[in-house]
Each structure stands twice: as C-alpha cells, then as structure tokens.
Amino acid sequence: MSHEIELKLALPKSALPALRRHPLVAAAEKLGNASTLDNTYFDTPALALKARKVAVRTRRQGRQMLQTVKCAALSSGGLSSRPEWEQPWTGAFDFSAVDQPEAARLLARHREELVPVFTTRFRRETRRHAPTPELSILLMIDTGEVTVRTPDGAERSAPICELELELERGRAQDLVELACALAQDLPLMPADISKAERGYRLFLDTPPSPLRAEASTIAAGQNVVDAFRSLAFSCVRQWQGNAAAALASADPDAIHPDFIHQLRVSQRRLRALLKLFAPALPENFAGTWNARLRDNAERFGDARDLDVFHAELLEPVTPEGLADPEAMAALLDSVQQARNEARRFASHNLDMATQGRLLLAFTADLHRLPAGGLAAAVDLRAFARLRLSRLRKRARRRAEAAASLEPTRLHALRIAFKLLRYGIEFFAPLFPARSIERYLEGVVQAQTALGFLQDVDIARQRLITWTQANPALAPAAAFVLGWHAPRYARLRRRVLRECAPLLEGRKPW
C-alpha cells in the first residue's frame, strides 16, 4: 500500500498557457511527453463501493494497464491523504494486495458484481519540482472530461482542467506552500472533490448543494492549537465548497443565493473561531485573519440582506385588498431590481483568483501554527469553560446596555449571542450533550428574535431611502412595516426578559 498525499487545484482552461509559462512550472523537470489516460471506474449497480467511500478503477496509459483501489480521506483546502493500492491489470480484478481489512472485505464481497459506471479521459503533462534534495513534488496538468452513459443511452460529460501537486518527498505543508506561490499569479481554486466523486455526481445527475457547517468533532484530550486547527479546517471546507459550487455556475446571474449565504456563514464562523482561540494563537494571527475574512465577507453582504428582506419581510405580507396595488407592485419590482443588481455585484466579486489565493494562504498559515509551548500545557476543557464564560459575560453586559431598546444596542446583543452560539457549537463535544443542547436551543431562539428585530430595522432604513427616491412607494412601504409592527413590538418588549435566564445562574459547561 502506498499513501498518496496530493493537493488538487482547479483552474479555467484559459489560464493553462499562463500556468505553463509560470517560472516555477517552466523550471520544473519535464517527465516525458504528455500522455492520454483512459480510466474506467467500477461499482456495483447499487453503488456499494461509493457508499463506503472506496473507488476501483482501471487505467490505460499507452500500452500499460493498471488496476487501482483508493479509499477516500477527508480533504481540506484541496489537500488530501489517502491509501492507494496499484498493480498491473490482467483482465480480472485482483484485490489480494489490499491490506486494509474493511476495504478488503468489501471488495471481496462485491467483486463479481462490479460493472463500469463512468469514465474519465484526460491529457496529463507531468513535471517534477525538486528545488532541494529534501523536497520533490510532481506537478500534473490534467485536461479532458469525465463521461457517463445513462441506462437510456444518453451521455453526460463534464470538463476536467486541474493541476495536481503530488508529494514525493517532503511535508504535506510543502504542497500548500507551492500552491500559494503559484496562486499569486494564477487563478487557482483548491478542489476537494476527486475525479471519482465528480463522476458519481454526474452518474446520479446530482447538482451541487450548499455546504452547511459541520458538527464539531474535537475531543477533550486534544492540544488547544490542534483543536483550533481541526475546527478551522472544517470551516475551510464549507468556504471552499460553496465558493467552488458558485463559481461553477454557467450563468453568474443564476447562482443559488444559498451558496453565497453559506460562504458568508463560513467567514463568520471562522472569525468567531479566531476570537475564541486568540489567547492560544500567535500574536497578530487572529487579528490579521479576522480583518481579511471580514473584508472578504463584505463582498457579498448586500445580496444576502436583500434576499432576507424579500423572503422574511415581503413574501409573508398578504395585502388582502387593503394595500395600494400599484404601490405594492412598484415596491416588489424595486426590490427585485435591487436583488438582481446585488447578485450581479456578488457574482462579480466571487473571483476564483481572489478566493483561491485567500483559501490557500489561510490553509498555509494553519499548517504553520506551532502546537508546542504554553498551548500544549493548557487543558482544552478548562480553556473552553473560560472562553464560554467570557462570551456569556460579554452578552450579559450587552443585555444590560440594551435596556433602552435602541436598535444599535439590540444589534450588539444579537452579535454577542451569535458569538456565544458559535462558541457552544465549537466546544459542544467537551460537555454533557443534553444540557448543552437545551442551552443552545435557548441561545438560538434569542438570536432569532433579535435577528428579526434587526431585519425590520434594516428594512425600515431601506424603505426610507427608496421612498425618498420614489415617493410612489410610500403607501406600500408603510403597509409592509405596519404588517410586521405587532410582532416587532411584541418581541421588542419581551426579548430582554427571555434572554435573562440564559445569561444568569448555572452554566451548562
């Protein structure tokens, strides 16, 4: 068994000439001529291998035929490490070399059922980057397509245009460092989805779906910095997955708004994580990346705010013959125009080069974090208790300051509850599940109530601006605000009272 450590990077086909001319690529040793690789991936009709994250393929490269078995591994920022078994293909499957018991049993059980599922065919150019005796990295440029033939005879295909960096000698971090250097001049996006996974998605005709936050998997015995790194990589996967899916859209104006929303969620969670672990991180690390991630999220903020305005405040309103129909139609049209413009702006700012460069730079900094020193001596559960107590104390101060019910102070309280919520979600595995879940439910309810108040306050400011520019919208604007006024007033009266039990008394941690 070999262990394949690689970093996969997607790029537009138009960037290939620049990639080949890049000094680091041009200086790398060329390993033979470009070759065409024909691959066939096999599975059972019920896709039993896919369900267990095992891939079986045969590859033709010139006159050579190979059989390869791979087991999937978690990929973050395009970087993955997975076991691989490769041997000559003799025309019949031979899995005797697979020495991972679970995978070996699976393959033996289904060997006779395996049938072709999809194929990939691509041209590969291979170079070796070996600037020192201790470091050797293969650079493989792959261009081609993955193809699926459906039972009804139809054919679906998707393009392949990737740069794979595969480690021969050195550290996994060296792959990221090389990728960062290339990304300074090229539009490279880390790609966590393998060719096999792309083939399965094409076979099943599964469109990409927005990636939501992963549940925390940290454990009490972990080093504090290692726990931070694990949680940060989880956020990176959410960021990269949603950015890549949005960038893959053929029509920038038709990008699903949830991709943008979940991308922003990843930035908020990362910023919360940086603040939470700041005492255990190198000086300036948290502050620098908090600012960079904030600026990145602000590229997409208006689009999400207008989607919320439309979905939460306009769609629920039923005029029932009481609203001015012309004014309501004009308002809906104005909102839709603003949403379209904001989405175009967000799409324009969702740039592969910028997102790829940020993702790779942050991933590289995560790998560089030292795990020794004082951080190694800190008990993770004690650290979590201290940080969560600090967040709760901060929320309590914000609640006291919000006694005036001024919108800005209520918004500050909402932000405090959001940070507390993220902190609880990050540290949840360290404490009794039942008490944490019950407390978290209360925090989410408080955040939701405060969020509605904030949404109405933002909507009011937008409607004032729009009616100043177009007075004909005034009757509809007044009707919409009036529709939500009873709920707004009710929540505003009781929100602090309902927050109080969460900020006083016994802590669940």
Image (tube, rainbow, N blue to C red):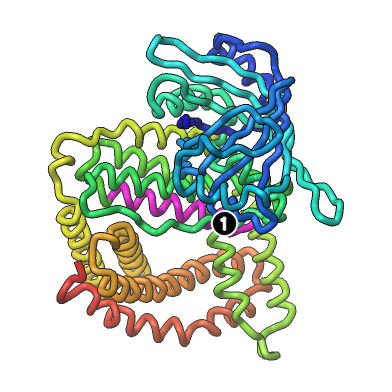
- Total numbered labels: 1
Give the quarter of the figure containing the C terminus.
bottom left
491 lies above or below 337: below
Residue 113 is covered by the magenta coloring? no
Q: Residue at x 46, y 21 (%)?
A: 168
Number of residues whose C-alpha sits closer than 10 Å to that of mark 1, classed few (under 14), some (14–19) or many (20 or more): many
319 lies above or below 468: below
Where does the image place residue 430, in percent across and percent down from the top left?
Answer: 24, 60
Where does the magenta region start and end?
Answer: 256-275
Where does the image place residue 371, in percent across and percent down from the top left?
Answer: 23, 36
User: Which residue has dot 1 on it?
Assistant: 210
Nearer to the camera, 123 or 235: 123
Where does the image place residue 321, in percent across and percent down from the top left?
Answer: 70, 90
Residue 270 is covered by the magenta coloring? yes
Q: Residue at x 33, y 43 (%)?
A: 229
458 sits left or right of 231 in the view: right
Whether residue 302 appears in this view of the structure is no
